[in-house]
Amino acid sequence: MGALRRHAPAVLAHLAVLALWAWATSWGGVPRFILPGPLETIRALGAPQIDWWRHVLITAAEAFGGFALAVGIGVMLAVLFTWFAPLRRALMPLLVTLNLIPKVALAPLFIVWLGYGLVPNIAITFVIAFFPIVITTARGLAEVEPELLDLVRTVRATRWQVFRKIQLPSSLPYLFSGMRVAAVLAIAGTIVGEFVGSEAGLGFVIMSAQGTLDTPVMVMSLILVTLVGVTLYGLVVALERLVVTEDARLR
Amino acid sequence: MRASAEPFLSLRGVSKTYRTGGRETVAVSDASFDLGDGEFLALVGPSGCGKSTLLKILAGLHPHDGGELRIGHAGFDPGRDIGVAFQAPLLLKWRRVLDNVMLPAEILGLPTKAARERARDLLALVGLEGNEDKYPYELSGGMQQRVSLARALVHDPKLVLLDEPFGALDALTRERMNLEIRRIWASSGKTVVLVTHGVQEAVFCATQVAVLTAGPARMADHFAVDLPEPRELAIRNTPEFGALARRVYDRLGIA
């Protein structure tokens, strides 16, 4: 009951947007080639020439794959940074510089290097999601109260014990805050990749439908992309709830 | 108390100078005193008098660069016979209370079952029975500090070092903790060194008081607190207590 009351405002806000959409496209007078109504958009799912499931799965595979790769490699690099300070001093500024490259601009180059298909889109998703992970995790690993280190030094804690019992768990809230940012970016990366060059995926569907001004298909694709993003983000938040105690979570 | 005449702790002219960018700062100079087994020493003084530095020297966290320092009797291992607590409770947010207390025992690799039993006993000793499975954020500041005291004792150290452990607590909680720490000290028989800037706290808690002054850092006085045991807060209204507190204020130049 409490949960229902707590989430009610958010649910209402979502429903209000749907209602506004329905109103604007019916009595509101927004023409259908600009924005189709909800029912018409749902009807686009019946379009015989589009295998929606396949496109959703491909987009999801690219987004989840690139994201998982970013988490794996990002965390690994952040851990290496805490163990080898010279490496951090050399590579951290380099990462900050590389982070300033507009990652979406790399997409055409990736297609040249890696060809069409899943691989270049996973690569673009990876580079866009990777930076927030490595930067927040490295910060989380480095941020340990000096007096806590003093405390464990009085019982001669080894470097490994400090890492496993203190640094790693205390960096988890940072990792998850990085992952939340990265989840949002990952979807954008995947779609841009599909825009630039692909033969499947929801980004490809949007580009194809643009040619025929098929706005119901475009809006439907947009909704499905968003659902893929919501799923990824939701998994991250659910995992965070599972492993990070309530007060330690970063907002 | 041991029959041996050898004190538990012995300092002779211990000093520490920090060098940063060609400038020298004397943090501790000529600290000399003996402390017997099971005594309770308060290091009292203003900020910058070197009391925390002295505590860190005793904890083996900083080397001293002058004088002689001897801690403990034969068989004393500074890597496992010292327990510490600081002003901040420094609890691990992701661990339950009992597991927080266990941290030093885990690091030392003590047998888990016995250590958990001991951690439970200590939580009862500091008045936190029934809170073993809570997370730190579910506890008040005073309760968190009790957990950190239990943690300082879990590996059964011979020397307990406390760096302003009640400095961040409200006045009433602080007074209650002064009583608590005396009770814990009396029932555990540990040798305790407490760093504080509270004159009342120092005289009330300790059996010996060392007064440190700042600018330049030096030890200005060291005396025994001959007040009856066990002590209650009302003892602070006695002339004997007043005289000792005034002695500290005099040494600190506070009229």
Image (cartoon, coloured by chain):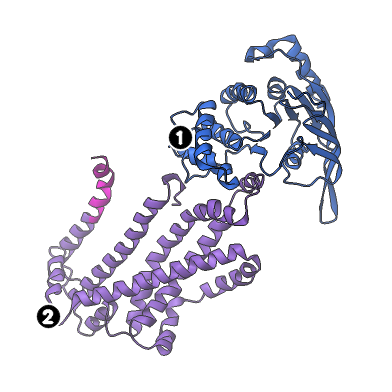
Task: Write down the residue under mark 1.
Answer: B132
Q: Is residue A20 above or below residue B151?
A: below
From the viewer's side, name the closer residue of B150 and A212. Answer: B150
Amino acid at circle 2: Pro
Q: Position of residue B210 (x, y in %)?
A: 79, 28
Q: Is residue B94 above or below residue A72?
A: above
Q: Position of residue A145 (x, y in %)?
A: 60, 48
Q: Is residue B51 above or below residue B245?
A: below
Left or right of A236? Residue B147 is: right
Amino acid at circle 1: Glu
Q: Position of residue A240 (x, y in %)?
A: 39, 54
* Display colour for chain A: purple
From the viewer's side, name the closer residue of A146 and B67. Answer: B67
Q: Secondary structure at mark 2?
A: loop
Residue A48: mark: 2
* Display colour for chain B: blue
